[in-house]
Amino acid sequence: MTPPRREKGLVRPYVVTEGRAFPSRNTLDLVTLVIATHDLPLGGLSPEKRRVMELCRGGSLSVAEIAAHLGLATSVTKVLLADLVDSGHVVTRAPIPPAERPDAQLLREVLDGLRARL
């Protein structure tokens, strides 16, 4: 009988989340936007949390995008993000609701105007 294969680099989700299955806050949705703050040191953060900080320093990303970049399940990513919100390393905001978004026709006109100036 052959021994079970061990994948290199495979980290179990409960190790990444320090044994927790649920985030400390329930406000994180797949489309919640995450923005890194720049005033707190990264010392003491896990490799996954440091990666989140690297990803979000370039601008806001959704929870789903961060999970995809990390290659982790969204439930695991939500636990990590909740920890980072609690520590003040990131802030979150809801995406702009469709009712508050500019009209598509107005955006086309602005784009046409910008192209005409070039």
Image (cartoon, grey):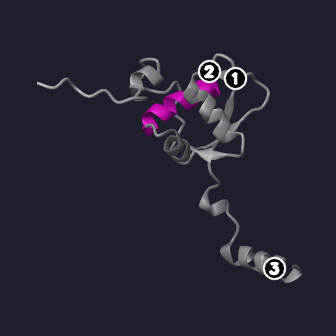
Which amino acid, by three-letter code, is at mark 2?
Leu
Residue 21 appears anywhere in the view: no
Residue tagged by mark 3? 115
The secondary element bearing badge 2 is classed as loop
Question: Residue at position x 71%, y 39% from top?
Answer: 57
Q: How far is mark 1 from mark 2, CA to CA? A: 6 Å
Position of residue 14 measured from the top left corner of the image (x, y, whole percent): 40, 22
Which amino acid, by three-letter code, is at mark 1?
Leu
In terms of image quadrants, where is residue 11? top left
Q: Is 114 placed left or right of 47 in the picture? A: right
The secondary element bearing badge 1 is classed as loop
Q: Earlier in the sequence, mark 2 or mark 3?
A: 2
Residue lying farthest to the right in this orientation? 117
Q: Is residue 102 above or below residue 23?
A: below
The image's mark for residue 45 is 2
The image's mark for residue 42 is 1
